[in-house]
Image (cartoon, helix red, strand yellow):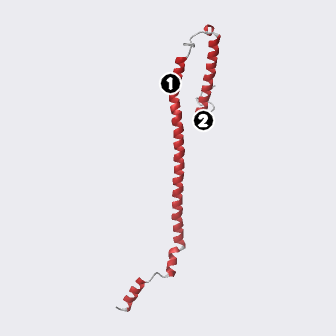
Amino acid sequence: MDNRTQEKVVSKGRSRDPRRAADAYSESALEKIIVLFRLGYAALQSKGKQRTELRELSEQNSELSKKLRAATKRPVELQREVQKSPIKGWWEASMDQLSLEELKLHKRMSEELSKMLTQEIEDRTTISHGNNSDDPCGTDS
């Protein structure tokens, strides 16, 4: 072997020069490492935000499902109440034909209906929070 071949063999067998190893940690290499670290951290934060948003949407879905079930049951309940009502066709009768007890009963039922309507209006106003109007139906009170 000549001297050049021996030098190449020796250089392959030696560890890297410590002065050159510092190049791996140069400023640009460190910047690349920092960028990669930040990208990983941002991805983790993004996943956390997605999980939070997914949890919030799931809670909203559950709440709306409960309201929907209650709303679908309500007509059935009202139908039962109408069938139980002691007075049939009271809206067709003249007020003179109703007894004092019947008038009081209708007054209580009207007050209950008024409360239910007020509550429904408040619920719908809350749901459509984007609506600036006090009257969600667009009619005069």
> In the picture shown, does residue 6 fall above or below 49?
below
Q: Position of residue 13 (x, y in %)?
A: 41, 83
Q: What residue does disc 1 label?
A: 76
> Which sits earlier in the primary sequence, circle 1 or circle 2?
1
> Horizontal and vertical percent for residue 133?
62, 33
> Residue placed at 64% from the left, 15% from the top?
104
Q: Secondary structure at mark 2?
A: helix
Residue 64: % across, % down: 53, 36
Specify the farthest residue to the bottom: 2
> Image quadrant of residue 131?
top right
From the viewer's perspective, is residue 61 above or below residue 17? Answer: above
Query: Which element is circle 1 on?
Result: helix
Residue farthest to the left, as pictured: 1
Left or right position of 129 against 17:
right
Name the image quarter holding the N terminus: bottom left
Which residue is under mark 2?
Answer: 126
- Disc tally is 2
Q: Nearer the viewer, mark 1 or mark 2?
A: 1
Q: Nearer the viewer, residue 120 or 62?
A: 62
* Distance Cα–Cα, label 1 vs label 2: 25 Å
Mark carried by residue 134: none
Residue at image coords 60%, 33%: 125
Which residue is drawn at the image coordinates 54% and 40% (left, top)? 60
Mark 2 neighbour class, 10 Å CA radius: few under 14, some 14 to 19, many 20 or more: few
Amino acid carrying label 2: it is: Thr
User: Does 113 sit above or below residue 42?
Assistant: above
Task: Point out residue 33 in the picture as x, y percentages from the top left corner.
Answer: 52, 67
Q: Amino acid at mark 1?
A: Val
From this view, report whether residue 87 is shown above or below residue 25.
Answer: above
* Residue under the point 64% across and 17% down: 107
